[in-house]
Every structure is written in C-alpha cells, then in structure tokens.
Image (tube, helix red, strand yellow):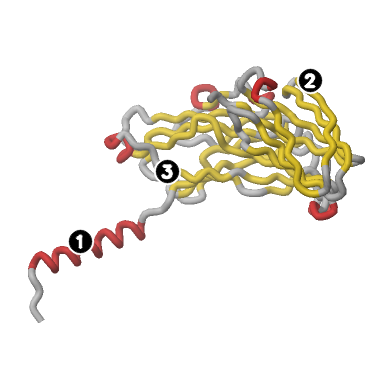
C-alpha cells in the first residue's frame, strides 16, 4: 500500500500533538483538608501542581477571622519575602494577598505538590467547628508563553476544609436543624442565604463587620425544607469581609461573606 508524503507528515504531526497534550498538566493551587486542635498554631500549606516557567502569580487567601488568627508566613520560594510579596494589611480580618513577578521574565518552577508558601494561623474557633480557607481576589497566573501571548493560565484554585477538634466532635449535618449556604460568595451584588430547615421555625440573624460592628439584624420564619434569605446590596457599605450569624433554637451557625468590587 502506498502513502503520500503529506499523509505521512500529517500522521506524524498528529502523534506529536497527542504526545504533547498528554504530557501537559493543568496548573493548580490548592490547600489540603486538615484536622487541627483548638488553640494550636497550624501550618496551612499552599501547594501547587503544574507550576512551570511561571513569570507572575497573584491571588488572595481568605479565612474566617472568628476561627483563625494570623501569625505569619514561612517557606517562601524564589527569594521572595513576606514584606515585599505579601499583603497582610487585612490579615486581622482574614485575608492575605500574594503577588510574585519575575523581573527577568525567565520564569520559575516548582515540583508537583511543592509548597508555594505556608500560612501560619492560630486556631481560635470552637471544638467541632468546620471552617473553609479559600482563594479569591485578583487571581492570575502567567507563564513564559503567556507573556508572549498576553494570556494568563487557566488555573484551578481549590481551598481546604479545616476541622477543629476530633472527628467525633463534629456535629452530624444530617442531625442539624438548619443548614446554611451563601450564594454567591464572594459577591458584588445581593447575597442569597440558602437555608435548609429540618423542622422549620423562627431564626434570628445578625450581620456584622469582622471588627464586631453590627450592620443589620432580623427575624425570619423558615418553613420546613428550602428557604432563601436575601441580603440587599445596600447593606454592604465597603469591600471586605462580613460575618453572618444565624440562630435557630439551640443551633448557632456563622458564615463569612466576602464583599468584592463590581
């Protein structure tokens, strides 16, 4: 059987493209789930995969300031420093920003699952609390190819769930009278508080700034099943973190709401 040269070249190029695509790995920045003890100082490792030839990186890490207190940052790579490459002005309210830029444009790399930096936090939350540490802010990662193409990488950012105390001390969600979810969060518009009430009843809610200043309060009657409490855009006077506290019977739930610019 005879093949034309163009057909052979086409097959070779297809094979090379397939090999190249299979070798590529998505870039991700993540925090692993952890179980910690009350009052201890913990090391929250921000890790990476597919972090190759990176010229610039920017993002923020957010946590509930009612559950954790900022202590410091360690394991900083590439000769970077806490003073020059991290923004800790809002650390007391639960936010640290990271900004790295390679002036040489040559890019830097880290092995898969290597530590980009370690965030040190003191656990101030109560035993049995589950609290998320998330990513947000000005999120962008650019490699050497992206500099030439003016295109940032498509990066997966995955936060971690921190459980305070022993697993047996964590409240069984199925047994809870109320479940709460915030949508969207972070938000620049109205915020929907999604409520799942097991039996229904009155719930009291309070919205405060992280410094404790009360913004709004109210009482809502929740029917059994799904309910929605809408918090108007006008309640949030500035960009930053807010704390929503909801109580139904003996159950108290706190959620952190992050306000961002539209």
Q: Categorize mark 2 by other alpha carbons within 10 Å: few (<14), some (14-19), many (20+).
A: few
Q: Which mark is residue 21?
A: none
- Residue at 35% from the left image edge and 27% from the top image edge: 103
- Residue at 79% from the left image edge and 52% from the top image edge: 173
Q: Are marks 3 and 2 in contact (CB under 8 Å)?
A: no
Name the N-terminal-most of marks 3 and 1.
1
Q: Position of residue 258 (x, y in %)?
A: 64, 30
Q: Position of residue 106 (x, y in %)?
A: 31, 36
Q: Nearer the viewer, mark 3 or mark 2?
A: 2
- Residue at 68% from the left image edge and 26% from the top image edge: 232
Taking depth in this image into account, of 150 and 179 the one nearest to the observer is 179
Q: Is residue 26 depicted above or below 240 in this figure?
A: below
Taking depth in this image into account, of 31 and 45 the one nearest to the observer is 31
Report which residue position mark 1 lands on.
Answer: 13
Q: Quadrant of residue 71?
A: top right
Q: Position of residue 83 (x, y in %)?
A: 54, 22
Report which residue position mark 3 lands on.
Answer: 154
Q: CA distance from mark 1 to mark 2?
A: 64 Å
Q: Is residue 198 left or right of residue 52?
A: right
Q: Nearer the viewer, mark 1 or mark 2?
A: 2
- Residue at 85% from the left image edge and 32% from the top image edge: 204
Count of marks, rendered view: 3
Report which residue position mark 2 lands on.
Answer: 214
Which quarter of the rendered picture does the N terminus lie within? bottom left
Element carrying mark 2: strand
Q: CA distance from mark 3 to mark 2?
A: 39 Å
Q: Is residue 18 depicted above or below 53 in this figure?
A: below
Name the N-terminal-most of marks 3 and 2.
3
Element carrying mark 1: helix
Q: Is residue 10 left or right of residue 84?
A: left
């Amino acid at each position: 059987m005879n093949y034309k040269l163009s057909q052979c070249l086409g097959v070779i190029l297809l094979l090379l493209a397939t090999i190249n695509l299979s070798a590529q790995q998505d870039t991700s920045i993540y925090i692993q789930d952890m179980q910690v003890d009350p009052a201890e100082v913990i090391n929250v490792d921000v890790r990476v995969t597919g972090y190759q030839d990176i010229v610039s990186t920017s993002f923020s890490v957010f946590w509930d300031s009612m559950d954790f207190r900022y202590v410091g940052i360690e394991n900083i790579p590439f000769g970077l420093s806490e003073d020059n490459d991290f923004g800790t002005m809002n650390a007391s309210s639960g936010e640290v920003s990271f900004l790295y830029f390679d002036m040489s444009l040559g890019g830097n790399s880290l092995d898969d699952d290597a530590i980009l930096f370690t965030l040190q936090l003191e656990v101030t939350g109560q035993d049995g609390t589950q609290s998320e540490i998330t990513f947000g802010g000005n999120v962008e990662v650019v490699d050497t190819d992206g500099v030439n193409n003016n295109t940032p990488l498509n990066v997966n950012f995955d936060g971690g769930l921190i459980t305070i105390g022993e697993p047996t001390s964590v409240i069984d969600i199925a047994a809870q009278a109320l479940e709460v979810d915030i949508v969207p969060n972070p938000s620049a518009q109205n915020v929907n508080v999604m409520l799942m009430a097991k039996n229904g009843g009155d719930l009291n809610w309070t919205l405060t700034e992280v410094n404790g200043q009360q913004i709004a309060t109210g009482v809502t009657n929740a029917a059994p099943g799904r309910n929605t409490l809408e918090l108007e855009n006008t309640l949030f006077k500035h960009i930053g973190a807010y704390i929503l506290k909801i109580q139904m019977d003996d159950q108290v739930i706190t959620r952190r709401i992050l306000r961002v610019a539209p």
